[in-house]
Image (spheres, rainbow, N blue to C red):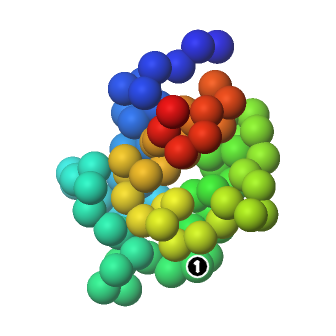
Amino acid sequence: MEYSLQDITQIIQELFVKQFSLAQVEVDKNYFDGNRANSIDALELLMEIESIFKFSIDDNDLNADLISSINNVSTYVYNKLYGLKNGE
């Protein structure tokens, strides 16, 4: 299936809403600051992303920036799906 960045962002937004029981989301907000989420939440979120998009997240890519915001996650997924490096 082909996904646009907008499609991916929408899916990631829905995952954040579900994972963190949010009424609304902000795409640039860091949901891992201020004890809103923890490492278990991050692991569950990443596993769900891998399942939906049918790829594995490389261990070398795992860091706090990757999952810090919806935009960061969406960009990573888009780049991973289409073989891009650092937003090419």
Which residue is nearer to you in this view: 47 or 79? 79
For the point 35% across and 69% down, which residue is it?
Answer: 31
The single residue placed furthest to the front in the displayed view is 88
Q: Is residue 61 above or below residue 8?
A: below
Which residue is nearer to you in this view: 66 or 33? 66
* Horizontal side of residue 29 vs 7, given as left or right: left
Q: Is residue 3 above or below residue 43?
A: above
For the point 65% across and 37% down, which residue is it?
Answer: 80
Residue 60 in percent (x, y) is at 74, 64
* Horizontal side of residue 72 vs 42, given as left or right: left
Q: Which residue is mark 1?
A: 39
For the point 38% across and 58% down, which residue is it?
Answer: 69
Q: Secondary structure at mark 1?
A: helix
Identity, as a three-letter code, of the amino acid under mark 1:
Ser
* Horizontal side of residue 24 vs 30, given as left or right: left
Residue 50 in percent (x, y) is at 70, 45
Residue 77 in percent (x, y) is at 57, 40
Residue 81 in sight here: no
For the point 38% across and 33% down, which residue is it?
Answer: 10
* Horizontal side of residue 23 vs 86, given as left or right: left
Residue 71 in sight here: yes
